Image (cartoon, rainbow, N blue to C red):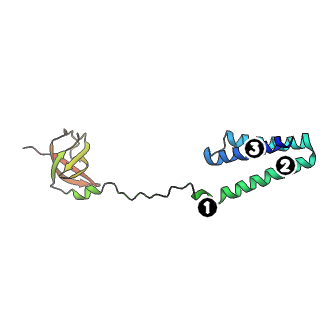
Amino acid sequence: MWWIVVTLLVLGILLMLVEMLLIPGVGIAGFLSIGSLGVACWYAFAEISTAAGWWTLLAAMVLLGILVFFALRARTWRRFELKTEVRSQMGTEVSQVHVGDRGIAYTRLAPMGTGRFGEVSCEVKSHDNTMVAAGTPVEVVAIEENKPLVKPITQ
């Protein structure tokens, strides 16, 4: 008879761990965990003895208390944190492009696209919001909000 109580207690604790670590939130695993612990206590009271019921209730409370203690410690969750740091910067190539630079529309500008100026590729915008075909020679006429404005070069 004790094996049923112990199995329900272990199942309740495992389901609570699943609820906290794998599928957080108030979900099915949490409800099943509480239900399993409750059934373990009820079974001990109803089928074994009153003393066994109280010991089962105490065991469930202690196990849940230990689980909550370890779950609320910051050191426990540091094991799950992402430790890498992103150091790359986006848009730094624009600082290498200046007014008057000439290049090509690497992609179609509709009105935004990619321009290539020597070895530098960056996002550019047509200065008058017109479409510019890919491969068209362009010239930087201004830089607004860290974005070069270009116009097609007519030869």
Work out which quarter of the rendered image holds the C terminus and state it.
top left
Q: In this view, does 126 lie above or below 86?
A: above
Percent across and percent down for residue 152 are 15, 44
Query: Dot 1, how many residues are within 10 Å of its Cα: few (below 14), some (14-19), or many (20+)?
Result: few
Amino acid under disc 3: Ile
Percent across and percent down for residue 107 are 23, 41
* Pointer 2 or 3: first along the chain: 3
* Circle 3 SS class: helix
Residue 79 figure quarter: bottom right
The residue wearing badge 2 is 56
Q: Which residue is drawn at 18% across and 51% down?
A: 117
Q: Which mark is residue 34?
A: 3
Q: Residue at x 21, y 38 (%)?
A: 131
Work out which quarter of the rendered image holds the N terminus and state it.
top right
Q: Residue at x 84, y 44 (%)?
A: 41
| In this view, the mark in front (1 or 3) | 1
Residue most toward the left?
Answer: 155
* Circle 1 SS class: helix
Q: Using residue 132 as the reference point, say whether residue 18 is left or right of it.
A: right
Measure the alpha-carbon separation of dots 1 and 2: 30 Å
Percent across and percent down for residue 128 are 21, 44
Q: Using residue 14 as the reference point, say whether residue 107 is left or right of it.
A: left
The residue wearing badge 1 is 75
